[in-house]
Structures are given as C-alpha cells and as structure tokens.
C-alpha cells in the first residue's frame, strides 16, 4: 500500500518561511515524479511545482524565486521550501506521486499553510 504523508504546515507571518515534507512508503519513490499542489476553498487544486526522477524541478511562475522543490531518494522524501511567503500562498498543500511507466498516481492527505499577520 503506497502512502504519502505531508508535514511542516502551519501559521506564518508574511515574509516568513516554511519547509514542507512529504515522505512516501510502500514503494521506491525514486521511480516517481513528485509534485506539490495546493488548494483553497472553492477553487480547483493548482499545480505548484514538480521534480523529476533525475532531480530537475519546475515551479509555477507565481512562486519562482521563492519556492524550491528538492528530493532525497534515500529517505523517499520530497520537500517544498517556501520563502517570502505571501497571504495568497495560504492553502492546503498536497503531495502527489506519479510512477514512471505505469502512471499510477497517489496523493497525500494535505497540510495546511496559513500566511497571515
């Protein structure tokens, strides 16, 4: 059974930083493209960024220069370092994994990030 567990969310002031973690179990996540999404009430879930099996990362334009995605295959983990947070970054952040080849897709349960003064 593949599981993804996010952690690291919380309340932070504008301009602050958080580091989200997503740890996978049940498979070798070095075979997965890992992504971060976020969702606010009443809106569709939106892609934040992803990182390939080779470690190449992409982010949506609105977070470029502020958010960094990285992964540690030895820990089956992917991270989202978020700096200079803005109120509009407030959302539930979800970890997503898609397995190369099969296309099997998995989601974590989400972690709340709130940016407020």
Image: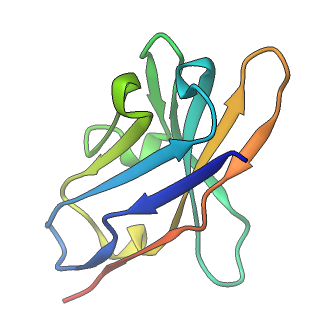
Quarter occupied by residue 71: top left
Whether residue 71 is visible here, answered yes or no, is no
Name above or below for residue 20 compared with residue 111.
above
Q: How many marks?
A: 0
Quarter occupied by residue 117: bottom left
In the rendered image, residue 11, in percent from the top left (x then y), is placed at 26, 82
Quarter occupied by residue 101: top right
In the rendered image, residue 9, in percent from the top left (x then y), is placed at 34, 70
In the rendered image, residue 15, in percent from the top left (x then y), is placed at 14, 66
Viewer-proximal residue, 78 or 51? 78
User: Going 73% across and 47% down the picture, which residue do you hit?
Assistant: 1
Viewer-proximal residue, 32 or 49? 32
Name above or below for residue 22 compared with residue 15.
above
Whether residue 72 is visible here, answered yes or no, is yes
In the rendered image, residue 36, in percent from the top left (x then y), is placed at 53, 47
Image-based side of 38 in relation to 55, left or right: right
User: Going 64% across and 84% down the picture, which residue do you hit?
Assistant: 41
Taking the view exactly as shown, the residue that stands out farthest to the top is: 54
Image-based side of 70 in relation to 40, left or right: left
User: Going 83% across and 27% down the picture, which residue do you hit?
Assistant: 103
Name above or below for residue 104 compared with residue 93.
above
User: Going 42% across and 16% down the picture, which residue do you hit?
Assistant: 55
Taking the view exactly as shown, the residue that stands out farthest to the bottom is: 117
Q: Please, which colouring scheme is shown?
A: rainbow
């Amino acid at each position: 059974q593949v599981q993804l567990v996010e952690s690291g969310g919380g309340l932070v002031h504008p301009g602050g930083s958080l580091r989200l973690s997503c740890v996978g179990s049940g498979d070798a996540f070095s075979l997965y493209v890992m992504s971060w999404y976020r969702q606010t009430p009443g809106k569709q879930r939106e892609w934040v960024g992803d990182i390939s099996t080779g470690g190449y990362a992409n982010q949506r334009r609105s977070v470029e220069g502020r958010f960094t995605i990285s992964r540690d295959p030895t820990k089956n983990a992917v991270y989202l370092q978020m700096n200079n947070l803005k109120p509009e970054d407030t959302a539930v952040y979800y970890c997503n994994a898609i397995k190369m080849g099969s296309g099997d897709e998995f989601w974590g349960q989400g972690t709340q990030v709130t940016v407020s003064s």
